[in-house]
Image (spheres, grey):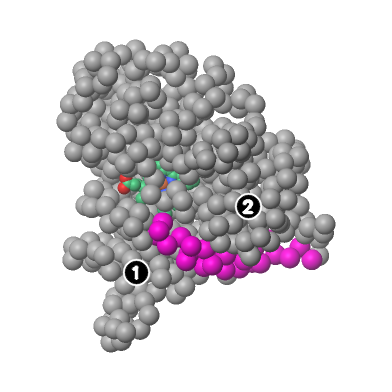
Amino acid sequence: MASVSDLYAPLRDVELQIPLYSVGIAVLAVIILVAAPSTNANGGIKAPYIGSKNRLFTRFQFLNRGWELAYAGHVQFKNQIYKVIGGDILVLPTSFVEELHNLPDEKISSIKANVKNFQGRLAGASILLEGNLHTRILQTKVTPQLASFIPRIEDELKLALKNVIGSCADGPVELTGYATVLAHVSRISARVFVGDSLCRNQKWIETSLKYVNNALGTMFVLRCFPDTMKPALTWVIPSSWRTSAAIRDAIKVIGTEVRTRREEQAKNPKAEKPFDFLQFMMDNASEFDGQPHKLAHRQLILSLGSIHVTSVSLCQIWFDIVARPEYVPELREELEMVQKECGGWNKEALGRLRKLDSFMREALSLSPPSILGFKRIVQQPVTLSDGTILPKDADIMVVVAPISKDVATLPNQVPFDGFRHYRTWKEAGGKLNNSFATTSLDNLHFGHGRYACPGRFLASDAIKMILGEWMLNYDMEFVGDKSRPVSTPWHEVMFPDLKKKVRFTKRTS
Ligand code: HEM
């Protein structure tokens, strides 16, 4: 079995690669494109700019000042539309989400925006435009059957605890926090997605992590350049080669699994089928989507949501717990009571962890994975309630962090109140739906409306179970500086401190 540091290795690569690429490629870009004269649909809208109007310059500037710029626009132009990245992105006030969130894909497309943001084919994501099989399966098979997934998640989690953290019988163990999160999330995710037969397959775990890290690296580099240059750049960016290699590896591993399952199921049609996402896709795909290489590719792309975004979110929430030990006794008390009354981990128990849920929502709203959300590409002109006409192909987003507090300060200056949402829920007699996974205008981290994240209920349950097991089994503290580790904004995303170590001590009381 690979150690935590083995699983973490691909991430270290990316950490080093992004800045090196940026510098080298920036020089190349400045030589080739002194001024990049390109236009887009956003150009047709009159709106103030945040940062320079020079698109090439601000694309690079956005790499390490993205959060600052987007947030500055939010504070300065509170109720107005403004442009970031030289006009690449039109940032709408959150108030417009209400009128846009249920428009159909033919009017404003979420998937096109997410694929474009992700650099489409060039980072291996264009398969998402071929159909929404994965989303349908998450919505209609996984979420409704989460209760049946919980024992499987628990089983995998217990194994991860044993293998990654251990019993601490010989004293405390010190582990890199993010790597520990990644090791737990990647195993649980593999169990849900590819089931018992493949979930501990080292090649598959490595392939999904390799894809996540290198696709993200490729995406950040390509976002800085005009579309015409991007295909050529993929020839010279090592993370792009590794992204393609990960897709090829996934096709080998998952493609073989699909063929083997089909042969066995044809021989023995009455045998019980595996209970996992891959099998649900196999059973519900069209002939085209059901080809082994298509299923493998789609499965791999899902690693971005199920591994990357979940790990980053969990790590941020966990760091807030470790940095605020005063919350731990109450969270543990709730966990112990609910476990006792519900007989362990199950759907009812997870639904009753309202204090933990509140803490998770508060933590993510202050340290969200991205500052920009509700990404949409306009497909047909849309007239907003203030009369603004969004033209076809306009690229719109909203600032999602930390809108709930609406303060003119930087995100990390907002006072943390872990039980804020618990109190509001209690005051409403337990009738308010303000849970971590419930989207609303003040909780946009999973999107909102018709195209909100279909994996959010699974993510919420898995995060609660991992944090719950850690708090029930271990005392945890940061190694060295005990204060909340500082996150690093990069482009629109925010990474937790990837190197911070946590000391786990077996709980005795
Ligand atoms: C805390 C963890 C997660 C966060 C913060 C998150 C966030 C998001 C956001 C913001 C979107 C875009 C929604 C929009 O366009 O309005 C999204 C879409 C999506 N997420 Fe998640 N996600 C998480 C976990 C997951 C998990 C665990 C899965 C898979 C099981 C998943 C699968 C997806 C898929 C498939 C889409 C695209 C939906 C579509 O338009 O077809 N996500 N997620």
Looking at the rendered structure, the kind of residue marked 1 is: Gln
Residue closest to the eye, 276 or 395? 276
Q: Is 104 part of what is drawn in magenta?
A: no
Disc 1: which residue: 279
Which element carries disc 1, helix, strand or loop? helix
Magenta span dominant secondary structure: helix
Residue numbers of the magenta segment: 142-169
Q: Which mark is residue 467?
A: 2
Residue 28, placed above or below residue 149: above
Residue closest to the eye, 254 or 32? 254
Q: Is 146 part of what is drawn in magenta?
A: yes
Mark 1 vs mark 2, CA separation in Å: 29 Å
Quadrant including the N terminus: bottom right
Left or right: where 467 falls relative to 7: right
Which element carries disc 2, helix, strand or loop? helix
Residue at mark 2: C-beta within 8 A of ligand 1: no
- In the image, residue 426 lies at what x, y percent? 61, 38
Q: Earlier in the sequence, mark 1 or mark 2?
A: 1
Quadrant including the C terminus: bottom right
- In the image, residue 262 lies at what x, y percent? 28, 77
Mark 2, Cα crowd under 10 Å, few <14 / some 14-19 / many 20+, is some
